[in-house]
Amino acid sequence: MIVPVDEIRNGKPDPEGFLRAAEELGVAPEDCLVFEDTRPGIDAGLSAGMQVVGLLTTFSAQELRHQPLIGDFRVVAIRREGEFLKIELSDRTHGVAERGSDAGL
């Protein structure tokens, strides 16, 4: 879901954009998974009550100060388990620990 910046009043790190996306999708914020490559984006996702995965595409791990972190989407595996999606992260190139999450549909 994309929420254009001209459709919200407050940009990141305010969670307004993420909360609006969840509302438009009809999904509770705690059932959302955000992928973000900036600290303000990570803060916005966390403030919205969402799970956040940091992307090492723009800033370093030290600058993002967040876990989990991934190098790119090639390390994301998604499979259906009943009514849930099982999301597994494993980053072979950056040595980031593997982590799994459940996200509702």
Image (cartoon, rainbow, N blue to C red):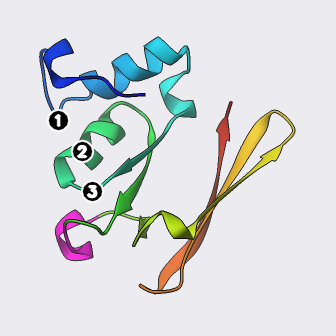
Which mark is on residue 41? 2
The amino acid on which the numbered mark 3 sits, given as a three-letter code, is Asp
* Residue 64 point in image, percent of width and height: 23, 64
Per the image, label 1 sits on a secondary structure element best described as loop
Nearest to the observer: residue 5 or residue 49: 5
Local packing at callout 1 (Cα closer than 10 Å; few below 14, some 14-19, many 20+) is some
Quadrant of residue 43 within the rendered picture:
top left
Mark earlier in primary sequence (3, 1): 1
Name above or below for residue 29 compared with residue 26. below
* Residue 26 point in image, percent of width and height: 55, 13
* Residue 15 point in image, percent of width and height: 26, 28
Label 3 to label 1, Cα distance in Å? 12 Å
Return the residue at label 3: 37
Q: State the residue at coordinates (27%, 74%).
A: 61
For the residues bearing labels 3 and 2, Cβ distance under 8 angstroms: yes
Quarter of the image with the C terminus in it? top right
Mark earlier in primary sequence (2, 1): 1
Left/right of residue 36 with respect to residue 64 in the rendered view: right
**Range of the magenta residues?**
59-65
Q: Residue furthest right?
A: 82
